[in-house]
Image (tube, rainbow, N blue to C red):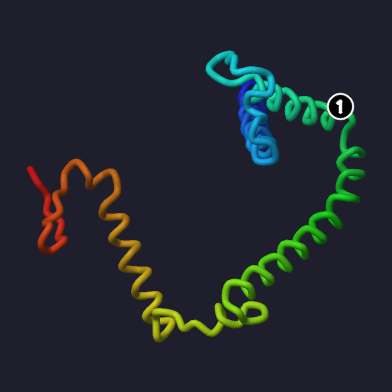
């Protein structure tokens, strides 16, 4: 039974990964979705199935090659993540300075928040949390909100 569930989750995760790959390729080339034609199979474009197959194949390769392949990938992926994070930070700082006229995040950091104290913030989030839980699914069918006061009253 556990193997069936594991296979199901593997398929779902590969579908989600294939969809992410589809969106990534679509962002690089707007013609990607119809690159193999506008035909569909099972309600999805052929490029979506191709992305699923590519992602699935990559996962199978990793399973087949074992942990050694993951160790090798990790050895270049970790520095890559650090470099890309640094580039993203530089991009953010440049965008922030271009938008505000300041260098760096100065204008963003100088803006004062809407809460005077931490206690004000906590009280506000507590009220918002109670308000959200009161409007949850269990209350929707039995509660009515007064438009004038916002009070909830049970209806029978």
The x and y percentages for residue 48 are 64, 25
User: Which picture quadrant has residue 107?
Assistant: bottom right
* Occupied quadrant, residue 33: top right
Percent across and percent down for residue 95 are 64, 68
Outermost residue on the left side: it is 156
Whole-percent x, y for residue 149 in the image: 12, 64
44 vs 65: above or below: above
Residue sitting at 67 percent across and 30 percent down? 32
Of residues 96 and 155, which is closer to you in this image?
96
The image quadrant of residue 67 is top right
Give the mark count: 1
Horizontal side, residue 138 vs residue 29: left or right = left
Could you tell me which quadrant the N terminus lies in?
A: top right
**Which sits in the foreground, 3 or 44?**
44
Q: Which residue is mark 1?
A: 64
Q: Is residue 155 above or below residue 125?
A: above
């Amino acid at each position: 039974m556990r193997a069936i569930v594991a296979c199901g989750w593997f398929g779902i995760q590969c579908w989600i990964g294939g969809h992410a790959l589809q969106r990534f390729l679509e962002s690089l080339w707007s013609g990607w979705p119809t690159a193999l034609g506008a035909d569909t199979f099972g309600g999805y474009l052929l490029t979506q199935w191709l992305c699923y197959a590519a992602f699935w194949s990559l996962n199978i390769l990793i399973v087949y090659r074992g942990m050694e392949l993951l160790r090798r990938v990790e050895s270049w992926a970790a520095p890559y993540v650090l470099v890309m994070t640094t580039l993203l930070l530089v991009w953010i700082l440049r965008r922030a300075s271009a938008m505000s006229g300041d260098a760096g995040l100065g204008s963003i950091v100088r803006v004062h928040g809407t809460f005077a104290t931490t206690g004000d913030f906590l009280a506000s989030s507590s009220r918002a949390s109670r308000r959200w839980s009161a409007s949850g699914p269990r209350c929707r069918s039995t509660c009515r909100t007064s438009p004038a006061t916002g009070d909830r009253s049970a209806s029978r």
